Amino acid sequence: MNQTADIIPGENATRAVAAKLPTEWRDFFTLTKPRVMTLVIFTAICGLLAAPGSIHPVLGFTAVLAIAMGAGGSAALNHWWEADLDAGMKRTANRPLPGGRMRREDARDFGIFLSAVSVFVMGVAIGWLAAGLLFAAIIYYAVIYTMWLKPRTPQNIVIGGGSGAFPPLIGWVAVTGELTAMPILLFAIIFMWTPPHFWALALFVKTDYANVGIPMMPVVKGERHTRHQILAYTVLLAPVAIAPWLIGGTSWVYGSFAVALSILFFALAWPVGLRNRQEGEDMKPEIRLFKFSIYYLFILFAALVADRVLENNGIIGAGVLA
């Protein structure tokens, strides 16, 4: 008797379907959550390019590749652990595991393999401080967030936000070899950005979470409380986003973008935060905020890199901490 199949609900059914359907490379790629990976790679590159000093292009590529592999590995472990939950939600029901196109243990082994290789490559090629931070990021997402926080507390996104905040921190450390105020601030920006970004999404997919018993904020505390939290975290995000300029880590170029983007973020969060939506009304303000929050992070980190490039070419003066 397969004890694993007895312990995990729905495993026998998943195995039966998986035996009939071929597993393709696209399904393994899907396990890495490529849409999320785009943001991971981008912020990692930004951290690497914005850091003072330089790194050989081959080593820089290796560092980003290791970060991407670590993120992909932890995402695969997330798929493995949440396969039955995914089966109960419309937006995730066709993923490789709930869709029956892959055996559950294959996803687990793939995730462990990618994670282990990523940490090893980072340690050998770049340094063990960066490797240690990458290992911490993997454990944070795959274990602390996925297995512990997400099914237990409506604060899962708040605390779990750290899992997605590691890439620019690791990229910076890959260049400098040390942990200073600036990379910690880059971590803090994504950490504070995650709640308003994700809760805006959770507001219009809350039924999915309710159906599978995940205690997301809109499900447990209700829409009104969630909206107030979105507004509160948007306000808290602004000074953190502007802080790299305020402490002298960047010039006015980054500072200008940080201020302007923070004002726009607040302008979009305000109607969401104070809205008293009636049943049946559309979710356009929430969707608009969610989409803008993605652009917000991309533009903010691009401005960070532009600031460093302009400084290195002598076009603008260096920040105090540069």
Image: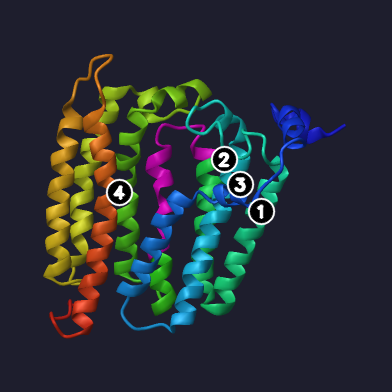
Callout 4: SS: helix
Figure coloring: rainbow
Viewer-closest of 212 and 144: 212
Pointer 1 residue: 110
Q: Position of residue 138 (x, y in %)?
A: 54, 55
Quarter of image, res 4: top right
For marks 4 and 3, the one nearer the N-term is: 3
* Position of 246 relative to 278 (above/below): below
Observer-side mark, 3 or 2, equals 3
Pointer 3 residue: 27
Name the side, left or right, on which 274 lies relative to 219. left
Please state which amino acid type lies under the numbered disc 3: Asp
Q: Give the quarter of the figure containing the C terminus.
A: bottom left
For marks 1 and 4, the one nearer the N-term is: 1
Please state which amino acid type lies under the numbered disc 2: Met
**Extreme-right residue of the structure:** 1
Say which mark, if any, is on residue 294.
Answer: 4
For marks 3 and 1, the one nearer the N-term is: 3
- Identity of the residue drawn at 50% across and 43% down: 145
Please state which amino acid type lies under the numbered disc 4: Ile
Q: Residues within 10 Å of mark 3 (few under 14, many from 20)?
A: some
Provide the residue span drawn in magenta: 147-168
Query: Is residue 254 on the magenta stretch?
Result: no
- Identity of the residue drawn at 43% across and 45% down: 160
Say which mark, if any, is on residue 236.
Answer: none
Observer-side mark, 3 or 1, equals 3
By secondary structure, the bulk of the magenta-drawn segment is best described as helix
Would you say residue 179 is visible in this rendering? Answer: no
Observer-side mark, 4 or 3, equals 3
Query: Is residue 158 on the magenta stretch?
Result: yes
For marks 3 and 2, the one nearer the N-term is: 3
